[in-house]
Image (cartoon, rainbow, N blue to C red):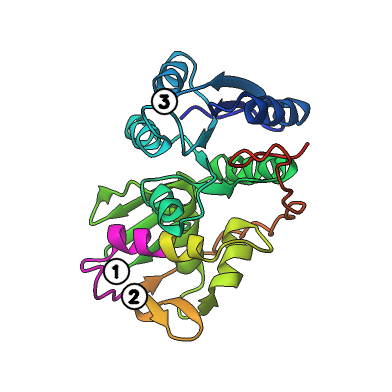
Amino acid sequence: MRNPPSGTGARVLVVDDDLTVAEVVTGYLERAGYAVDRAVDGPGALDRAAAREPDLVVLDLMLPGMDGLEVCRRLRARGPVPVIMLTARGDEDDRILGLEIGADDYVTKPFSPRELVLRVESVLRRSRAAAPAPRPGARLRAGALALDPAARRATKRGADLALTVREFDLLAHFLRHPGRAFGREELMREVWGWDFGDLSTVTVHVRRLRGKVEDDPGAPRLIQTVWGVGYRLEAGEAEVPGVPGEVEEPGAEAPAVAADPAGREGGPRP
């Protein structure tokens, strides 16, 4: 993924077959300073992304033909472009599946477009977060894991780990605070920058992260569950040389969700 420009000007690809939803979302993003491309189906989205690489994709889950899950899989296979999924489905399994195949975030219809813009800003901010220049002792370690915040690179026994933006930030947060137990609400505030949201997002990301960093994800030794609290990185596994980097301050959350007066499956309220 190319580095998007700082501030405004990042390019967002909006993929939704509901023209009303797409137009409202596009309008809000453009007023926030983003350049916007649009597609109405999966093949069109893949073609648009290949022709002009987006900095982030807003992707509807329920597309005709090739659904949003398959589009997300194919986009993630090409590279680590951030993806925010839009879903009108009430089934939690669909939202979790979207996160498990690599989506960075999701918003459930009907939604406030202001909230979506805040989510876009949050995901982009973390995907391009400026890290301090590499210096001796800046890397974080835990057992066979090594994480370089400056290079945004994580390895296990010398092999690169394919982490999403959120997975990388979550692992870095644990490594900077070995031995400390974090509740899901606390992780959502400090890693996602949200003051409220669906806590299953944290659960799914921890499970995905364990699948990549643990030798046996079914019996994790590194990222432990603290029953009744949340999760903890085992202090005996972690080595934090030098001075750890700063953790980004939590961001503001969005306005309330509104109903769709048209009675369609869901849509934004301007």
Q: Earlier in the sequence, mark 3 or mark 1?
A: 3
Residue at x-position 66% and y-position 63%: 196
Where 40 falls versus 123 (above or below)?
A: above
The picture quadrant where one finds residue 125 is top right
Q: Is residue 147 left or right of residue 212?
A: right
Mark nearer the N terminus (2 vs 1) = 1
User: Mark 2 and 1 residues: CB-CB less than 8 Å, in contact?
Assistant: yes
In magenta, the rendered stretch is 206-221
In the image shown, does 145 or 117 lie closer to the viewer?
117
- Which dot, 3 or 1, sits closer to the camera? 3
Which is more toward the observer, 181 or 198?
198
Q: Which residue is mark 3?
A: 42
User: How far across and down, in percent of the image, does residue 232 sit?
Assistant: 44, 77
Q: Amino acid at mark 3?
A: Gly
User: Which is more N-terminal, label 3 or label 2?
Assistant: 3
Q: What amino acid does circle 2 point to? A: Glu
Residue position for label 1: 143
In this orientation, does residue 234 appear?
Answer: no
Between the residue at mark 3 and the residue at mark 1, the CA separation in whole angstroms equals 41 Å
Label 2 crowd (10 A; few <14 / some 14-19 / many >=20) = some
Q: Position of residue 184 (x, y in %)?
A: 54, 71
Q: Is residue 207 magenta?
A: yes
Distance CA(mark 2)–CA(mark 1): 5 Å
SS of the residue at dot 3? helix
How crowded is the residue under tag 3: few (<14 C-alpha within 10 Å), some, or many (20+)?
many
Secondary structure category for the residue under label 1: loop
Left or right? Give the position of 60 relative to 225.
Answer: right
In front of the other: label 2 or label 3? 3
Q: Residue at x 78, y 36 (%)?
A: 270
Numbered disc 2: secondary structure: helix
